[in-house]
Amino acid sequence: MSVLSELLIIAVGSALVSNVVLSQFYGLCPFLGVSKQLKTASGMGLAVIFVITLSSLVAGVIYKFLLVPFNLEYLKTIVFILVIAALVQFVEMFLKKSIPSLYESLGVYLPLITTNCAVLGTALTNVQEEYSIFYGVVNGFATAAGFAIAICILAGIREKMRYNDIPKPFRGMPIVLITAGLMAIAFCGFSGLL
Amino acid sequence: MDLSAMLTAVILIGILGLLLGLFLGFASKVFHVETDEREEKIIEALPGNNCGGCGYPGCSGLAAAIVKGEAPVGGCPVGGEAVAARVAEIMGVEAGSGKRMVAYVKCGGNCEAAGKKYDYHGEADCRMAALLPGGGDKSCAYGCLGYGSCVKECEFDAIHIVKGIAVVDKDACKACGKCMAACPKKLIELIPYDSEYMVACSSKDKGPNVMKACKTGCIGCGLCMKNCEAAAVTVSELVAHIDQEKCVKCGVCMEKCPRRTIVNEK
């Protein structure tokens, strides 16, 4: 199998088939919290893509060149948390100074996802699946793209939902959870893809 | 137990943490962005519910605009005079006479006064209903449809559907203007909090048609305009309008109105 088709399978697999929110249940907090409007949801999606791709790279490098040589693989969780948190802090400072327009558009979502489980989860999956650093970055990007797709779909549905006459006990969060569940069932349809 | 493995782990993580900390501290110096300290103080003074009523994206947006001089110190409609005074103090200027405004629905055609043209069973939303033939199911094409699009928009629970039309709770209203934007009939306007006499109609229809559609609709007869001593009432496009700045609150217009369109809601 060529490298390209292998990468494609990884990408489709983590973006659609085993979608990070809808089949692995990572990152549910922002998925439910910031999906009220399509605009904020797409902002969040972008921020997640940005952070996960970058953190996959940095976590991969740290694991390969720092943890493996010293036989400290068992410390990966705590090291990844440390590195990712510091990385996001740094990226935020860097953007504020250098690209204020991007900083404005990512806004509050960037610091919000510092300790998101989807970010850590992707870094750990890369290690578990024994991906190389490049494969890990591709996997991270695809996972985050899957998150962005899912949160944008849910935000689109929620924007339309306000026009509906929802039974009283289901108003607010319950109907959103039911919607998310139905979306998860729909995404099961992708499992035949690979 | 392998002591050296433990030591390696402790030292490595310690060094890693130290390096990251130093790196971040260093980076924060290098990438330091000058911010006006007044801006942070203003953010603290603002209510912080990020309602967007001021027209800026959230309270921090308004604070930035105030510091730049693009927005007035009383730019926050929610905080009112108290917040305006505090912001003015931070900015070192006099607070303008921030008059408290409230929303008012210019329609009195409740279910007792106006009827329905046909039965509507669609989605309970004014913007949907207003697209239907004749501007919705209400007998008056200009009146409040009563499906509560404004109620859904209000973040302060200040507007409710009473007897089939929207009514503003004056004391809860923060004049953020979200209901005004939501109303497809453009029935809601901002008036001073201490207003007493209001025209509860927006119908631009001719007299006979208004008579058929609603018991309290304005027919544009102009009696209120002729009798107003302060020249505060004008009739244009067959509907009366009271200029609240000029109104002396004498109540003559209400007495003279043959249709009881002008109401006193002190």
Image: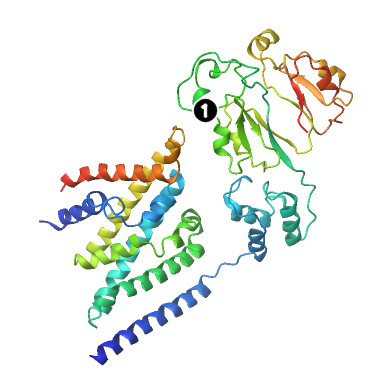
Give the left or right position of residue A16, taking residue B199 as reference. Answer: left
Residue A175: horizontal and vertical position, in percent? 39, 42
Q: Is residue A132 visible?
A: no
A59 left or right of A155? left
Instruction: Work out whether residue B118 or residue A148 is closer to the camera in this orientation and state it.
Output: B118
Res A168 → quadrant = top left
Q: Judge whether A32 appears above or below A122 on screen.
A: above
Q: Is residue B213 left or right of residue A169?
A: right
Q: Is residue B211 visible?
A: yes
Assign the N terminus of chain B to one quadrant of the image: bottom left
Residue B201 against residue A57 in the figure, above or below: above
SS at mark 1?
helix
Residue where numbered disc 1 is placed:
B127
Give percent across and percent down for residue B253: 83, 21
Residue extending farthest right: B229
**Relative image position of residue A169 (x, y in whole percent):** 43, 40
Q: Amino acid at mark 1?
A: Arg
Find residue A123 and report its image quarter: bottom left
- Which quadrant, please, contains the C terminus of chain B? top right
Q: What residue lies at 29% left-to-right and 77% top-to-bottom?
A: A75
Q: Residue at x 62, y 25 (%)?
A: B163
